[in-house]
């Protein structure tokens, strides 16, 4: 299976989206395997039952310039991509173990702030005169925006903007809800200024929730609030939909807002369902 990010429409975080999709595929396949094991256990071999794997896959991810477009004859044409990096992705997939996600150096440089990765021994692949640097994706990194903020150097020549930002922060601390919008051309330092103000808020013991949106989120209702709520409910990208729902339901019960579950589920774009429980022979309740 060939999955393409960046064509025909490119986004600024295509490598991150590709790695996120690979992790989600691994999680979905684990869920499917568990379901198949339970449903067809009497038909499966001992080896399969011991491994817990009925269906397996492996993934290779690269990033680079490729040809993308229609290929074929007048009778049959299809949209596809061709190029050195497409071939390299296939080589990495072939070198991976089942369930393993391998990326090359170019992808690693673009996603290392967002995912935990382990450097592997470089490998030789067909069509390459030199060995290829290799990394294994282990999972999503925690608090990537916080990590970026803490690595920042001092902000220079933004005294007026900092003064306005700190004034807005003080209003929030005093209980006046407000909004601060930072806008400007690409590369002018908007993120750096935002990180400085976030740092000041955390230094003053404010509870801070992060949301990082992309261009393709513009048509998604409440995209910013969905990200903030997922953080509040401690929902991760690898959570099964039922776990996702249960975390929301548990939090609402904790703050006595169960009666708002339908509206909140609609805002977050999910149907909130409890994890069903059953009685064992002992009479004890078990999930």
Image (cartoon, grey):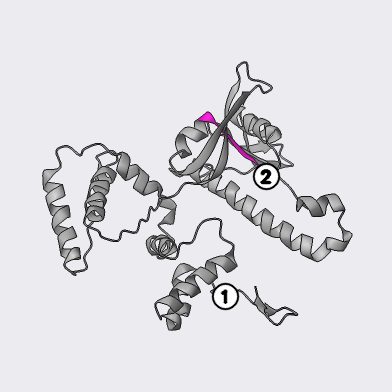
Lateral position of residue 190 relative to residue 254, left or right: left
Q: Is residue 201 left or right of residue 126?
A: left
In the figure, residue 279 lies in which quadrant? bottom right
Which label was assigned to residue 273?
Answer: 1
Q: Which mark is residue 139?
A: none
- Name the residue beneath numbered marker 2: 99
User: Which segment did they paint magenta?
Assistant: 99-105
**Residue 239 locus on image (x, y percent):** 56, 60
**Which of pointers 1 and 2 lies earlier in the amino acid sequence?**
2
- Out of 13 and 33, give the one closest to the viewer: 33
Instruction: Give whichever of 42, 168 is nearer the camera.
Output: 42
Tag 2 secondary structure: loop
Q: Position of residue 230 (x, y in %)?
A: 44, 62
The residue drawn where x is 82% and y is 51% is: 48
Q: Quadrant of the N terminus?
A: top right
Report x, y in % for residue 117.
53, 38
Furthest residue toward top: 129
- Residue 183 visible within the image: no
Image point (56%, 66%), residue name? 243
102 within the magenta span: yes
Magenta residue check for 182: no
């Amino acid at each position: 299976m060939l999955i393409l990010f960046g064509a025909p429409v490119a986004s600024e975080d295509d490598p991150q989206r590709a790695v996120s999709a690979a992790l989600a595929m691994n999680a979905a396949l684990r869920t499917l395997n568990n379901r198949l094991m339970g449903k067809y256990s009497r038909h499966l071999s001992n080896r399969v039952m011991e491994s817990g794997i009925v269906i397996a896959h492996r993934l290779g991810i690269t990033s680079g310039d490729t040809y993308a477009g229609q290929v074929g004859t007048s009778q049959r044409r299809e949209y596809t991509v061709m190029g050195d990096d497409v071939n390299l992705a296939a080589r990495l997939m072939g070198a991976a173990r089942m369930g393993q996600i391998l990326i090359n150096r170019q992808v690693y440089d673009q996603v290392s702030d967002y995912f935990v990765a382990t450097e592997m021994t470089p490998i030789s692949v067909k069509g390459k005169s030199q060995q290829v640097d290799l990394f294994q994706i282990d999972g999503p990194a925690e608090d990537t925006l916080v990590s970026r903020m803490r690595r920042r150097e001092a902000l220079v020549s933004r005294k007026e903007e900092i003064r306005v930002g700190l004034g807005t922060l003080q209003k929030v601390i005093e209980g006046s809800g407000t909004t601060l919008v930072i806008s400007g051309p690409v590369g002018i330092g908007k993120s750096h200024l935002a990180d400085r103000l976030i740092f000041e808020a955390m230094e003053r013991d404010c509870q801070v929730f992060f949301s990082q949106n992309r261009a393709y989120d513009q048509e998604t209702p409440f995209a910013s609030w969905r990200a903030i709520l997922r953080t509040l409910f401690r929902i991760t990208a690898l959570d099964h939909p039922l776990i996702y729902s249960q975390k929301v339901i548990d939090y609402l019960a904790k703050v006595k807002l169960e009666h708002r579950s339908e509206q909140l589920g609609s805002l977050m774009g999910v149907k909130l369902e409890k994890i069903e429980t059953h009685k064992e022979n002992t009479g004890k309740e078990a999930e």
